[in-house]
Amino acid sequence: MIPQTLFDKIWDSHVVKSIEGGPDVLYIDQHFIHEVTSPQAFDGLRARGIPVFRPAMTLATADHNIPTKDQNLPIKEELSRTQVEKLAENCREFGIEVFGLNHPKNGIVHVIGPELGYTQPGMTIVCGDSHTSTHGAFGAVAFGIGTSEVEMVLATQCILQPKPKKMRISVNGTLQKGVTAKDIILYIISKISGGGATGYFVEYAGSAIESLSMEGRMTICNMSIEMGARGGLIAPDDTAYEYLTKIPSISNRPDFYSLLKKWHGFRTDPGAHFDRELDFDAARIKPMITYGTNPGMGMAIDDTIPSIDSIASEASASFLKSLDYMGFTPGMKLAGHPVDYVFLGSCTNGRIEDIRAFTHFVKGRKKAREITALIVPGSKKVEQQAINEGLDKILKEAGFELRQPGCSSCLAMNEDKIPAGKYAVSTSNRNFEGRQGPGSRTLLASPLTAAAAAITGRITDPRDMLQD
Amino acid sequence: MAKEKFDILESTCIPLPLENVDTDQIIPARFLSLTTREGFGEYLFRDWRFDKSGNKSGGFVLNDEKYKGRILVAGKNFGCGSSREHAVWAITDYGFKAVVSSFFADIFKNNSLNNGLLPVVVSDEFLKNLLDQIQKDPETKVIIDLKQQLLKVSSGESTGFEINQYKKECLMKGLDDIDYLLNITDMIKAYEFRKTLGK
């Protein structure tokens, strides 16, 4: 038997048909949809006069366009309101379960899938959103698709997809205190660039990866797309089984034990071949911050922005344009630079552990007066848990407000926009020009780095301010 | 449902010599709220085409009258970022039928092929020469022959390009992926049955 990677095992066992000279027909176990990338897909089904093939394998949520305050009131912005209403109508018409605005299970699609037990090891999972790779943390083959492909999956529960190449990224060693999963992935992307994994599906391995909690693993897999990877996964282990077992909809299943047994088989065989392998030392990773307008333009928080001489000539025009947009210069130090906004949230870092970390950091301290902070839980479940743990009170003491769930400032489709020219330290996943609002300047970082900036009003190394 | 067939495209080009142009630039998030496929061309490169007051930005190539065409020639890693297919709809609605670059992000490439926008991958060197040629002479014509997988420039250079054979056939015949899949529903159901048997 030829040793196989976990990715191969999952992909190959889901191929319905391999087209000669073309893609594979891949069966999809779980399809997530949201209000932005689904309306045209449903219109397509209606135009063809066909139903959704497997409604029970489809789950919908409203997350991108919803407000994060006063969710009980009608959505003010007309186009946003229309999109959210359209999703509810479409789901009603086609018989799809939807956790809409104000539903107790509502939240960001890549937060609710895992926490509610929809995401499981060995599955193929798709969604019309590029951060679908998040679900890979459970040992699933999960990736983002376009609206035409959403229509395809709704119509046939299958997708046409060429099989990507395989890459393994190993991170070994022990992380320093104050360094988190977010810093690991920002570090990796800064080393291999925004297109460095294009054409590959990544498996993350190594002792540092194994030491992460499920939420930390989700943060890692979430940003696989930012290095151009089709997706990223981590083999399930005891950490994963423990997390999954705590979810009633999984542990109450009559076939729970045979499911657990099946999951134990989802590992990469020793000696399996990867098309490319990379190794990183966890101990060298420091808290990261991005300085440019793509996630690959990141550096250690105490480092300086690269000088123009260190940039290849073909890339120098984009490099300078990027720095100009950010109001930075080559060779500049970022530590100590004033900041205007702090955003804690998104499918990258909007879970309970992220809120706990932020809250613990700011406990007994006060938000800097010049900072506007948006603290956005990833789901109603996360929000409720934060309240149950009294985190909202600690945050309030420190001058912060826990908002309601949604994608919020990550892409600012709702009113949570960062104004032009303002600097935002953000725990989200993209720092493209105007991503958080036209003219806004995003600095991607971990929840700890965001907390440090929120207290000092400047880019600050969280390691200097850790408290027990 | 049948789409327009892609055969031979002959056109002048619009040069965009910037690398890593991401989908947030191609179509900013605030325009994703439309619920139909039409009308996105108006928002293509919105924040580069128009300034904050809504006036045309002088420096941006789409506002430069000397460049016209249905072929966009762009720097490496065009279309990186989000999976939003709206980026492709904006490009095709604006009038483009092909994009030439030395590197496309996977999701963008797939979305293009699914919407009749042909992504043509050429070498870094060919791309640089082509961009230089177009900027030197905006009347430069490019012929893209999908069947031969050949791109010819009126100034004499030419190059072959790779394309997935299945996608090529779909583009040439104006065929739709979903029609293909709907025709093999029995095979999909057979797969589901095998799975429940714990195959």
Image (tube, coloured by chain):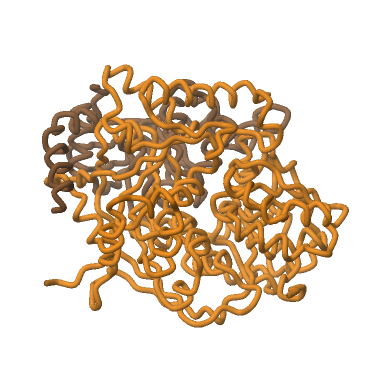
Chain colours: A orange, B brown
Residue A362 in percent (x, y) is at 77, 62
Q: Residue furthest right?
A: A369
Q: Residue at x 80, y 51 (%)?
A: A396
Direction from residue B193 to residue A149 in the image, left or right: right
Query: Which one is in front, A246 or A94?
Result: A246
> Do we see residue A312 in this rendering?
no
Query: Which one is in front, A193 or B9?
Result: A193
Q: Quadrant of the N terminus of chain B?
A: top left
Residue A215 in percent (x, y) is at 52, 60
Q: Residue at x 22, y 26 (%)?
A: B174
Direction from residue B125 to residue A364 in the image, left or right: right
Q: Is residue A149 above or below residue A462?
A: above
Residue A350 in percent (x, y) is at 60, 52
Residue A2 in percent (x, y) is at 14, 71
Q: Residue at x 38, y 42 (%)?
A: A145
Q: Is residue A271 above or below residue B167?
A: below
In the rendered picture of this protein, how many numbered marks are placed on residues?
0
Q: Is residue A151 above or below residue B82?
A: above
The answer to which image quadrant residue B10 occupies is top left
> Do we see residue A369 in this rendering?
yes
